[in-house]
Amino acid sequence: MVGITILITIGLKDKADKFLSILGSVSCTPVAFIFPAAFHYKVCAKTLKQQIIDLSLVFIWIGLGIYCTVLGIQDWNTE
């Protein structure tokens, strides 16, 4: 796995930072923001207020994750 990562990085050359920004928005946003709110909604949220807050957080972070991914893709061909 490390070898594959090294080969990808060598192949990307000067675009590695842009690849990492896309990878971060796709993989880190769910782990850091979406999953905790979704798990709290599923396991702990008992009142309607808690459920609304949890679902609001999930949808806000999904939107921001998509937005950051789109920005990373648009930035791919810029210097």
Image (tube, helix red, strand yellow):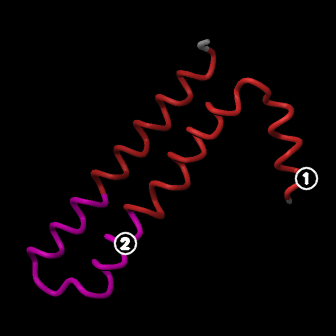
For the N terminus, the image quarter is bottom right
Q: Is residue 9 above or below residue 50?
A: above
Label 2 packing within 10 angstroms: few (<14), some (14-19), many (20+): some
SS at mark 2? helix
Question: Would you place residue 70 above or below residue 61 in this image?
Answer: above
Badge number at residue 3: 1
First in residue order: circle 1 vs circle 2:
1
Which residue is tagged 2?
36
Question: Residue at (37%, 51%) from the top-left corner?
Answer: 62
Q: Position of residue 8 (x, y in %)?
A: 83, 40
For the residue marked with disc 2, what is the amino acid? Pro
Give, as a single range, the part of the protein colored magenta: 34-58
Image quarter of residue 68: top left
**Picture residue at 11% right of the left edge, 83% below the top:** 47
Q: Are marks 1 and 2 in contact (CB under 8 Å)?
A: no
What amino acid type is highlighted by mark number 1? Gly
* Residue 44 in magenta stretch: yes
Magenta segment's dominant SS is helix
Q: Find out whether residue 55 is within the magenta segment.
A: yes
Image coordinates of residue 69 in percent, x first then y, are: 50, 37
